[in-house]
Image (cartoon, rainbow, N blue to C red):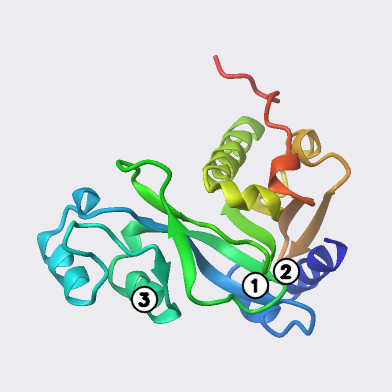
Amino acid sequence: MQQVIHEIEEGIKKVGFKSLCEILSKSPAFIWEEAYPIAVVHSQDRIKEKELVSLLKEHDLLNEEGFTPTSYSQDQLDFFVENAPQYLQTATIMCLKKATPYPQDFNSKFPKDYWKKMQEVEHVKSVVELSSFTDKDTKCSVEFALREVMRKRKEVNVLKKAGYVWIAKIPKDIMIDEVMKHYFLENYTVVYHDSIAYHIGWNETLKGINMRYFVCPPR
């Protein structure tokens, strides 16, 4: 993970938040992909737009029973990105050890599940999530956002095996060290770009991050 963090640090120092993936894509060690699909809608019962149902059926992305495929080519996932992004869950950035093997399998656990979720992470080094905050935020609202995104990612069970990096873009006068050290222990650093602080926390696996205790317990 140290190489992953080093590349993220150097990228942020150069371009900050907005163009980070563009800089990371030049890495000789990893493949970095933005808006990486991790779950796709399970059935047409969840799709509100009738015209979208017709479009997906037209492109063989809904079968006669109204279910989406369990195996996807890159073109099929790209079609979802372009035409039905609200029915696709994506990670902000995915750091890959090697190119994604296609077709990619997505499966649901129960017949009425909302999502089919990715099934393979052998090619994944780490999930990278980025969140942006304002001067109205506090350490408690930052903790809430962090816990929400980690909880959401843990719902895709296979991602628990992968590394995890969280980056918080935050005004310099908001102190969140307590939150970052609570969840990431010593795996925490801060870098700056244009006087903006980027707090970076990471762990070798998502499942290794303890979410049992809070900095700001719920009331």
Q: Nearer the viewer, mark 3 or mark 2?
A: 3
Which label's residue is closer to the chain start, 1 or 2? 2
The reply to whether discs 1 and 2 touch (Cβ–Cβ < 8 Å) is yes
Q: Position of residue 26 (x, y in %)?
A: 71, 85
Spatial CA span between label 1 and label 2? 6 Å
The residue shown at (78%, 33%) is 182
**Which is in the foreground here, disc 1 or disc 3?**
3
Task: Report the quarter where the C terminus lies.
Answer: top right
Q: Quadrant of residue 194?
A: bottom right
- Measured as percent of width and height from the top left, residue 198 is found at 72, 56
Q: Which residue is mark 3?
A: 76
Crowd tier of the residue under label 2, counting other residues whose Cα lies within 10 Å: few below 14, some 14–19, many 20 or above: many
Quadrant location of the N terminus?
bottom right
Q: Earlier in the sequence, mark 3 or mark 2?
A: 2
Residue marked by disc 1: 20
Tag on residue 153?
A: none
* Residue ID at (54%, 59%): 91
Decide which of tag 1 and tag 3 comes sooner along the chain.
1
Residue 12 - label = 2
